[in-house]
Amino acid sequence: MDFKQKKVILWSPPRCLSNVFCRSIETLKKTKCIRNLFSGPYYFGPNHPCHIYAPLLDSQLDLEGLSVKDLTYEQMKALVTADYPDVDLVFIKDHPHCLPESLYQDLISGAFASFIHTFLIRDPERALYSNYKASLSQQLIGSNLDPPSGGFNEMYKFYNFIKEKQGTTPVIVDAADLQTHPDETMRSFCKAVGICFDSNMMSWEPAPFHGHYNVWKADWHQQVSQSTGFIKTKPGEQKPVPLYEMPSDVVKCIEDSRVYYTEMRKDCIKPLF
């Protein structure tokens, strides 16, 4: 393995534009992108703690020849830290709500010691509204959101763990900046983690979004598969989120999540003009 190889993990709650972020990173040469490995043990593994999905069939799994019984946290750690030769950047994205707290220490020590942990946040109104609509289309069992907490509190807990244990403030990107100033925000992110920015990161060809769990492709990944770049918006031009369309428990989750979002927003990197 090249000793100069970068290893970066992007953590975010669902529906925070993390997949389109990955699409941008994938345009870089000699890059290996790994998505949602830790989601496997959480939703589908032999001891999965979350039961909102029907059992996964081996035919619905596209993961290095493994079967559903192999979806354990130990196996996922091995895949993330495996040797990927001839690659300059290993880029992982996943959701902190899928991590048991017992795994936190493992993710900053041993084979993970060289990994750079980063975070992507989004206004909870927009993230959880999108989450709510997608969860409805999936007809998830017993929940209006996936996860029911929205994922912001788990992210904040893991963020504070990283911040305390490593003694530095992790890189945080706000999805709002990606939408209003995508070029400048990706430049800032690349500089912060030591990646060479390439202007080609701003556009790409539509292509099927490769995910390890095919059960999510139709509803969760359709839009990013059809994308050709970041959808740029002007500050303040997005339509208000129709909170009246959502159940009271989802609105309450948005209110609770805003506390965590607001705290992390204070430490966000700024677009690089």
Image (cartoon, rainbow, N blue to C red):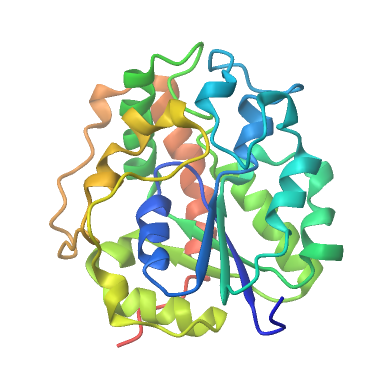
Residue 266 in view: no
Furthest-bottom residue in this view: 273
Q: Does residue 46 sit above or below 17 in this rendering?
A: above
Which residue is rendered at x = 39% and y = 14% of the image? 139
Residue 97 at what x, y percent from top left? 62, 39
Left or right: where 96 falls relative to 264: right
Furthest-right residue in this view: 110
Q: In which image quadrant can residue 241 be found?
A: top left
Residue 242 at what x, y percent from top left? 21, 32
Residue 36 in view: yes
Q: Does residue 46 sit above or below 195 in this rendering?
A: above
Q: Does residue 123 sit above or below 90 in this rendering?
A: above
Which residue is rendered at x = 32% and y = 67% of the image? 177
Q: Which quadrant would the N terminus be assigned to in this image?
A: bottom right
Which residue is rendered at x = 82% and y = 64% of the image? 111
Residue 147 vs residue 200, the one in the foreground: 200
Residue 11 vs residue 64, the one in the foreground: 64
Left or right: where 28 falls relative to 225: right
Which residue is rendered at x = 50% and y = 42% of the image? 257
Residue 156 at what x, y percent from top left? 62, 52
Left or right: where 20 falls relative to 79: left
Residue 45 at what x, y percent from top left? 70, 26
Q: Which quadrant would the C terminus be assigned to in this image?
A: bottom left
Q: In which image quadrant can residue 102 be found?
A: top right
Left or right: where 108 falls relative to 118: right
